[in-house]
Amino acid sequence: MLKFQVHSPGKVILHGEHAVVYHKPALAAVVGLGTKLQLRSQEGSQVASFQLDALNCTLEINLQEFNAFLTNFRQKYPGDKLDSTAKLMEEVRSEVSKQLERSVGSTPKQHTQRAFISIYYLLAGAVLTAPNQPTLTLQTGFQVHVDTELNVGAGLGSSASYGAALATAFLILAGHFDQSSYLQDENLALISQWAYESERVNHGTPSGVDNTVCTYGGILRFVKGQGFQSLKIHKPLNILLVDSRVSRSTADIVAKVRHLAEDFPQLIEAIWQACEQLVNSAVPLYESFGNAQDDSQKFEKLERLFQINNDLLKAIGVTHPKLEQIFTIAFKRGFFSKLTGAGAGGYAIVLLPENFECNEVYWKLKEELEGAGFGVHVTTAGGEGLRVTSLDN
């Protein structure tokens, strides 16, 4: 009986948000919060069921219908190795649309539709590309339970985390690799590739950052259209993730910044260049932090970079009164913070020193933030990536 658990982390942007849209470098780090997926095969069942806690729904795939879909696809596109996934995406959208109409009777919420398309698309993709099994079908039902600590649409990479967890589960199910070999380079690349495909369902043309950092972990430096480099870090940073509880549209904020850049092109370009210099200054600090006695000095420099970065983001108008309240509470207690992601709401990051739990001021900070109505999560930035573990009954 196949049963296992996947933990797929979320991410934060440490530096370079907004500037990255204009081809400047940014740093993204994996966070300790993430998505947990549990899979258990069900002997004698012909149904794959998916309980998605974040969307408060359960979706089902009838394996007989799913296998018929696979057969039809193979007949329609004989010898297709899925080098281009566009055909599969088109066929899946059509099939899911028909199935949802039959089973629900009315059009479900957009989030539910996207979730079902992601599941069907990734499962079909994993089975159709199964190594040495050109006619593989699914004969045994299974149950999948997905729960997440990541708020949807808050800039923490929730959809990439979800996609990476699903991709890993389905690739194991279809025999691409197993629990003992998933960390091999080619297998992590495969997970990241299919997590990116899942992102396409949710975001159309994703950057590839979220799926990469959620899969591999650590801290990545990236420039739009130029790929990624992993930083060689010694240990993750301690951070406080603070939820402003203000929702916003990333697209609207990016458009607002674009208008500002059109009105004041030289001024905003100077800010982007400052953001680039900031990333260049931050990289050696992150790479050397944790390997020497002068960590306190490096930490102070990182605090200053957080402050400068935050002030640059304020200058382009992406703060919010609730974020300002978080910054003020943190600064009053001697902690440095910045917004992360699009801004105008969403999350802020507060840098925490070593042994912060022993610091009475930290507990006062946490208490004051919670008392002000903010969501507070103690976690790390730059830890390990996706992991698969055994599942007890």
Image: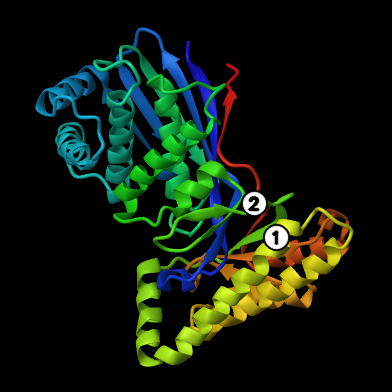
* Total marks placed: 2
Callout 1 amino acid: Tyr
Location of mark 1 (residue): 286
On screen, 124 above or below 148? above
- Give residue 42's position: percent from left, percent from top: 41, 13
- Give residue 252's position: percent from left, percent from top: 35, 73
Residue drawn at x 50%, y 38% as measured from the top left? 147
- Give residue 333's position: percent from left, percent from top: 79, 73
Residue nearest the viewer, comparing 55 with 297: 297
Is 71 positioned to the left or the right of 293 in the image?
left
Is 64 positioned to the left or the right of 225 in the image?
left
Q: Residues within 10 Å of mark 2 (few under 14, many from 20)?
A: many
Q: Secondary structure at mark 2?
A: loop
Label for residue 93? Answer: none
Q: Residues within 10 Å of mark 1 (few under 14, many from 20)?
A: many
Instruction: Using the rendered view, name the quadrant where residue 105 is placed.
Output: top left
Q: Inspect this view and state whether residue 56 appears.
A: no
Residue nearest the viewer, comparing 166 with 371: 166
Residue drawn at x 37%, y 21% as measured from the top left? 174
On screen, 158 above or below 302? above
Instruction: Using the rendered view, name the quadrant where residue 266 is placed.
Output: bottom left
Location of mark 2 (residue): 382
Is 354 positioned to the left or the right of 108 in the image?
right
Q: Earlier in the sequence, mark 1 or mark 2?
A: 1
Callout 2 amino acid: Gly
Q: CA distance from mark 1 to mark 2?
A: 10 Å
